[in-house]
Image (tube, rainbow, N blue to C red):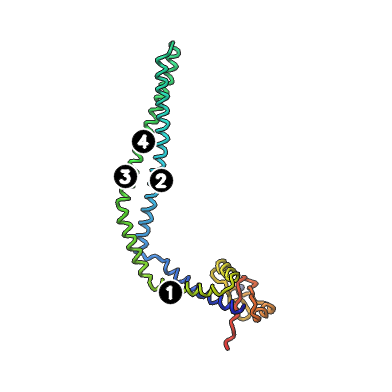
Amino acid sequence: MSADVEKLWELQSVLSQLGEREKQMAVKPEAFAAIDDEYTAANTEMNRLGESLESLAKERRRVDGELSDQQEILKKYQGQLMQVKNQQQYAAAWKEIDSTRKHVKELEDASLKNMGEADGLQKQLDERKGGHADLKSRYDEAHAEWQASLGDLRKEAEELRARAAAIEAQLPPRLKAEFHKIFKQRNNVAVAPVANDSCNSCRTRIRPALMQQLKRGELVFCEGCHRILYLEKPAS
Ligand SMILES: [Zn+2]
């Protein structure tokens, strides 16, 4: 077991070096950050315009559907007008025709207004699309430049990743899982060295019984921070 803890200790050191590289690689240089913001904003705006157009089109289909229904109803009332038998029926039919016409007019207006709005949005979207190829190529170029500048860091990170994988391959799966769980929960420190009979991470004193277990090479967790304790071999 102590050999396994030795490996965990090494894995933790490799992972922390890898974390450093990844942090450095994630920092966007100013030149790229500017174009990245512009590109992201342009994409967001194009999506927004696209969604607005879609919802306008949906609304227009609804309005146009209702409009054709109302036009049918209007025709029906106009037909009835021919068959009225007295003044009272005539007045009633006219009243229906009048109110349906008003409704038809409202729907026609709504449809026109919708078309006007859609035209405006479509124009904006077309303009955006026109400039997008150029923006995208500037973005790609800046991104490639940035990535190229990371050459050494990327190579180092790859090597560290390979080393971590090689160490992990030698660990029992349960121990590996336990390590990663603690690593994630405890600020990327899963293994704490023992110094002066105390946990070096949280300074909790280690009881003599646990020290005995450690010396026997057993897996021991700190009673303060629940990290895996690592007893360095005395230099021989
Ligand atoms: Zn501790």
Q: Earlier in the sequence, mark 2 or mark 4?
A: 2
Q: Earlier in the sequence, mark 1 or mark 3?
A: 3
**What label sits on residue 113 in the rendered view?**
4
Within-10-Å neighbours for mark 1: few <14, some 14–19, many 20+: some
**What label sits on residue 51 in the rendered view?**
2
Q: Amino acid at mark 4?
A: Lys
Compared to residue 7, the image places residue 94 above or below, namely above
**What label sits on residue 123 in the rendered view?**
3
Quadrant where the N terminus is found in the figure: bottom right
**Cα–Cα span, label 1 and label 3:** 49 Å
Q: Amino acid at mark 2?
A: Glu
- Residue drawn where x is 47% and y is 73% of the image: 162
Q: Are marks 1 and 2 in contact (CB under 8 Å)?
A: no
Q: Amino acid at mark 1?
A: Glu
Within-10-Å neighbours for mark 3: few <14, some 14–19, many 20+: few
Under circle 2, the secondary element is helix
Compared to residue 51, the image places residue 18 above or below, namely below
**What label sits on residue 203 in the rendered view?**
none
Q: Amino acid at mark 3?
A: Lys
